[in-house]
Image (cartoon, rainbow, N blue to C red):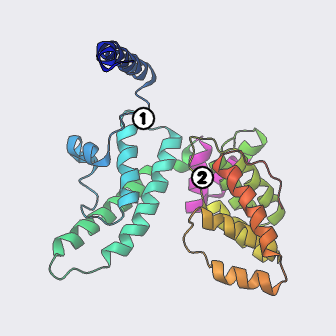
């Protein structure tokens, strides 16, 4: 093909691209815009300052703050019980972070301290507001929140009754169930946590607290090999607070074949990354 031939054909290519773009735009209108043009936190704050102004303005707790802002933006029209639960968890993580940051003094930049205190007060206010009616809810998410944060036994019994009804049908609810079971039955909790991991889909972020739960349970059971496997999984998912070196020392002292255990951990990691986990307890 000569250069002139390409030049002559180029307009039809451009037209085809334009038609494809228009078709995509039409599809986005039908499906709610998906995530192709998802707004950034900066864009949300510029257009909706009320969603951001009550949080700390500096760079601390950036990830935690971003989750709150995006959640506010995405659910400004309606707030379902599940969305309320998610935002409660977001504010808990934010409060933990901003409490630590607010203790850092700035001799020359006192306004940064004030901004962090403002964020802390916002977290406390929003946690109180969002949790106000959790104990009277019919949502398993909010009932579990009430039971676990306020020790409400009636809420816990109602939450547990949903298991018999088959209503604890998400990974987060199964993790919540396991956190209750672990108090009296380690092995049942392990089965529930495995089932929880099998429920994750491509759209879900895995709650990596599960890995720490596995490590803690297996150590209490004295099963160092299994604790080592889940430590390697947790490492791959960049879980904070791990003492991987100490775990390796323990595994070697127990005479474990760490190469074989790491191969096993790699299989688990691959399945989790593909959201195709289907293993029974080790």
Q: Secondary structure at mark 2?
A: loop
Q: Where is mark 1, residue-wise? A: 35
Q: Residue at x 65, y 67 (%)?
A: 212
Task: Measure the C-alpha gap from mark 1 to mark 2.
Answer: 20 Å
Q: Is residue 155 left or right of residue 63?
A: right
Residue 110: percent from left, percent from top:
17, 75
Q: Residue at x 34, y 49 (%)?
A: 69
Asked whether 87 falls inside the magenta stretch, the response is: no
Residue 246: percent from left, percent from top:
67, 84
- Mark 1 and mark 2 lie on one chain; the one further toward the N terminus is 1
The residue segment tinted magenta is: 138-160
Residue 172 in view in this figure = yes
The C terminus sits in image quarter = bottom right
Q: Is residue 168 left or right of residue 184?
A: left
* Residue closest to the eye, 280 or 191: 280
Q: Residue at x 38, y 74 (%)?
A: 100
Asked whether 159 falls inside the magenta stretch, the response is: yes
Kindly check if marks 1 and 2 are in contact, taking CB atoms under 8 A apart as contact.
no
Q: Where is mark 2, residue-wise? A: 206
User: Is residue 254 shown above or below 110?
Assistant: below
Magenta stretch: dominant secondary structure: helix
Q: Is residue 123 left or right of residue 143?
A: left
Residue 53: percent from left, percent from top:
23, 53
* Residue closest to the eye, 69 or 173: 69
Q: Residues within 10 Å of mark 1 (few under 14, many from 20)?
A: few
Report which quarter residue 189 is drawn in.
bottom right
Residue 157 in view in this figure = no
Q: Residues within 10 Å of mark 2 (few under 14, many from 20)?
A: many
User: Is residue 193 shown above or below 101?
Assistant: above
* Residue closest to the eye, 222 or 21: 21
Report which quarter residue 64 is drawn in.
bottom left
């Amino acid at each position: 093909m000569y250069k002139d031939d390409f030049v002559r054909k180029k307009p039809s290519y451009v037209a085809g691209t334009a038609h494809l773009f228009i078709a995509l735009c039409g599809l986005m209108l039908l499906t709610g815009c998906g995530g192709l043009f998802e707004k950034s936190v900066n864009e949300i704050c510029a257009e909706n300052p009320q969603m951001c102004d009550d949080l700390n303005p500096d760079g601390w707790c950036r990830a935690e703050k971003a989750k709150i802002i995006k959640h506010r933006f995405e659910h400004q029209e309606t707030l379902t019980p599940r969305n309320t639960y998610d935002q409660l968890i977001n504010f808990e993580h934010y409060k933990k972070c901003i409490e630590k940051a607010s203790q850092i003094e700035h001799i020359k930049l006192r306004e940064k301290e004030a901004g962090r205190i403002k964020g802390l007060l916002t977290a406390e206010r929003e946690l109180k507001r969002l949790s106000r009616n959790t104990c009277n809810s019919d949502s398993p998410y909010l009932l579990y929140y009430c039971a676990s944060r306020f020790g409400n036994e009636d809420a816990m019994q109602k939450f547990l009754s949903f298991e018999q009804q088959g209503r604890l049908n998400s990974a987060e609810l199964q993790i919540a169930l396991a956190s209750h079971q672990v108090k009296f039955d380690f092995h049942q909790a392990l089965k529930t946590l495995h089932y929880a991991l099998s429920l994750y889909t491509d759209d879900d972020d895995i709650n990596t607290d599960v890995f720490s739960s596995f490590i803690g349970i297996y150590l209490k059971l004295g099963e160092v090999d299994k604790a080592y496997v889940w430590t390697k999984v947790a490492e791959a998912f960049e879980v904070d607070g791990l003492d991987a070196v100490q775990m390796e020392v323990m595994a070697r002292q127990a005479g474990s074949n760490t190469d074989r255990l790491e191969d096993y951990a790699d299989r688990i990691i691959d399945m989790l990354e593909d959201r195709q986990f289907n293993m029974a307890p080790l």
